[in-house]
Amino acid sequence: MNFFVEEISPRRLDVYLSEKLSATRSHVQKLIANGLITVDGANVKASFKLTGGEEIFIAEARQ
């Protein structure tokens, strides 16, 4: 799944995604730490600040 971030005031990646996906922040942080979420094609930390215009890619978790 991938999508573009609309223009927003600076927000942490983990906070933004937990609200957008209705997931817990700790779950989102685990996905980021495992490299399953990238921003503009790069691995980033959960504390990465989004401002708008970024492309977020969420890979499917392997079972």
Image (spheres, rainbow, N blue to C red):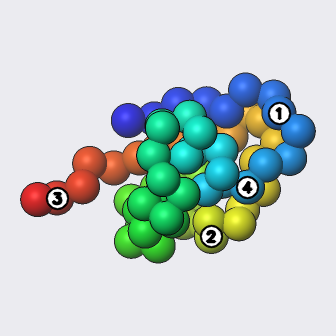
Give x and y (percent) for residue 22. 48, 38
Tell me the element at label 3.
loop
Which is closer to the viewer, label 4 or label 2?
4
- Compute the Cα span from label 2 to label 1: 19 Å
* Relative to 50, residue 44 above or below: below
Q: Amino acid at mark 2?
A: Lys
Is mark 1 in CB contact (under 8 Å) with mark 3? no
Residue at which label 3 appears: 62
The type of residue carrying mark 1 is: Ile
Q: Residue furthest top?
A: 6
Of labels 4 and 2, earlier in sequence is: 4
* Viewer-proximal residue among 33 and 26: 26
Identify the residue at horizontal 66%, vertical 51% (top origin).
15
Give the residue drawn at x 78%, y 36%. 52
Q: Which comes sooner in the sequence, label 1 or label 3?
A: 1
Horizontally, residue 16 falls left or right of residue 52, namely: left
Q: Secondary structure at mark 1?
A: loop
Q: Residue furthest right?
A: 9
* Residue 5 drawn at (x, y percent): 67, 33
Give the residue at mark 1.
8
**Front residue (pair 20, 4):** 20
Mark number displayed over residue 45: 2
Circles 4 and 3, Cβ within 8 Å, touching? The answer is: no
Name the residue tied to disc 4. 12
CA distance separating discs 1 and 3: 31 Å
Label 4 to label 2: alpha-carbon separation: 9 Å
Instruction: Give the mark, 2 or 1, whose residue is nearer the N terminus.
Output: 1
Which quadrant would the N terminus be assigned to in this image? Answer: top left
